[in-house]
Amino acid sequence: MHSSIPGLGRVMVFLAAALASASFAIPEDWGEEGMQYGQLGTDVTLSCPGGSMQWDTGATALPEGSAIQQGSLVLPSASLALMGTYSCHDEDGGLLHTVALRLGVVPAPLPGSYLPGVPFVSCRASDYENFSCSWTSSVETFLPTRYITTYRKKSLTGEEKWRNKNGHVGLCLQDSSRPGTCTVHRSEFWSSYRLNITEVNPLGFSYRLLDVTMQAIIKPDPPESLVVEPIPLAPRRLHVSWKYPSSWPKEPHFQLRFRLQYRPVIHHSWSVVETVNLSEVITDAFAGLEHVVQVSAKDFLDAGNWSEWSAEARATPVRACHRVPQVLGTVASLSCDSLSVTDHSDSLEKMAVLVSLGVFAFFILAAVLVISILIWLRVRKHGKDKTKPNFLVAATHLKLYGTSALPSPA
Ligand SMILES: *[C@@H]1O[C@H](CO)[C@@H](O)[C@H](O)[C@H]1NC(C)=O
Ligand SMILES: *[C@@H]1O[C@H](CO)[C@@H](O)[C@H](O)[C@H]1NC(C)=O
Ligand SMILES: *[C@@H]1O[C@H](CO)[C@@H](O)[C@H](O)[C@H]1NC(C)=O
Ligand SMILES: *[C@@H]1O[C@H](CO)[C@@H](O)[C@H](O)[C@H]1NC(C)=O
């Protein structure tokens, strides 16, 4: 946790402080055959493949002040009236090329500007070898747009710094199958990268700079092949296993740790356990209730962020009560419905303690009872004796002594 937060903070700071700038360029080719864009009020240059000394606009004459320079037609401070189709010809009047000129307004600070806005960029590494950045434009320009995506590497070693001074700029590679994303391949885990994502349209460009370190942006894909199984004879247990995400290269130096969340389907709050293993035994499940389980992964050394949760897996711990070895007779069969076999010895111990306590308590009680009865009897006897008249006592004594003193008839 602690190691990831400073990195994250740095990313955030640079996000906020990312430099943005714009300038107006008029690239010639926008992939649209015969289409050219220009900014109102600036000089616009129309070029002709191979160059030509002859240009026309079809109907009207070339605008005042226009000039042909090295075969290109330069239109001074373009106004809306100049929008139209231009063509260039060879010496014999043969058509070489036609260009449709579109002009736009650039009220730069105002919304609705045609100028590209500074794109929003975020970067993420799903493994420690390559990372990707994705972007969205911040302004709808209604113009064809492309992105130039580059990076510079900053590193702590002297050699790399030297390389940086010499302007080592790498390409963050764009893949046409994943628009809005580029990838820096074979990135170094301990280096820091300054990304430059530049949005370009016919009227100009804007870029965002973003500093990233792998430690801050690493976020694995979720673990795969999650399997949850009941454990026979163990009504409170579930065995859970999973595999590394297939996008994570297996290497002893870069491992993952995991966390598991589970709950009975009918409950809403999750229990969470963390582990470094690829399997775990849940020991506090509810017998007979279906449970839902998910797992997520994080860099072993706590860099970056937890992955998303994996797909769910479900299982129900056994409900049935199996025959338990008759270790202590009735005690064993008592524990069978709510406790697992592995808990059994534990529970037997507890039972035994309870039983001995009970027996002990019983004997104590019995002893107390017997003593009380004896005392009561004695007290009662004394009481009776006292109430008898004296002569009777004397008589009894006499009688007693008399009987005992008399010789036996034999
Ligand atoms: C990272 O990029 C390299 C070069 O394209 C590729 O060979 C490698 O498989 C990628 N690593 C992962 C984990 O995708
Ligand atoms: C970012 O990239 C654009 C296009 O390559 C370039 O014009 C601009 O100077 C770069 N900005 C920085 C600060 O490197
Ligand atoms: C799980 O990891 C612990 C160490 O944290 C280890 O002692 C134990 O043997 C592992 N269990 C399995 C099933 O791999
Ligand atoms: C990490 O994940 C949490 C929860 O999904 C999220 O709030 C946070 O923004 C993430 N941080 C990063 C750097 O992705």
Image (tube, rainbow, N blue to C red):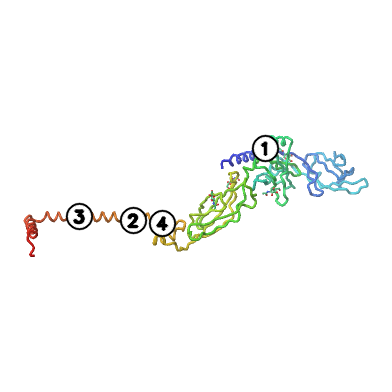
* Residue 294 image point, x, y percent: 56, 54
* Residue 199 image point, x, y percent: 72, 43
In the picture of the structure, the residue carrying the numbered disc 4 is 348
The quarter of the displayed image where residue 326 is located: bottom left
Near-viewer residue (407 or 352):
407
Q: Nearer the viewer, mark 4 or mark 2?
A: 4
Q: Is residue 389 above or below residue 125?
A: below
* Residue 328 image point, x, y percent: 40, 60
Looking at the rendered structure, the secondary structure element under dot 2 is helix
Looking at the rendered structure, the secondary structure element under dot 1 is loop
Residue lying at the far front in this picture: please name it.
Answer: 410
> Are circles 3 and 4 on residues that touch, CB within 8 Å?
no
Q: Nearer the viewer, mark 3 or mark 4?
A: 4
Q: Which mark is residue 358?
A: 2
Near-viewer residue (186 or 120):
186
In the picture of the structure, the residue carrying the numbered disc 1 is 155
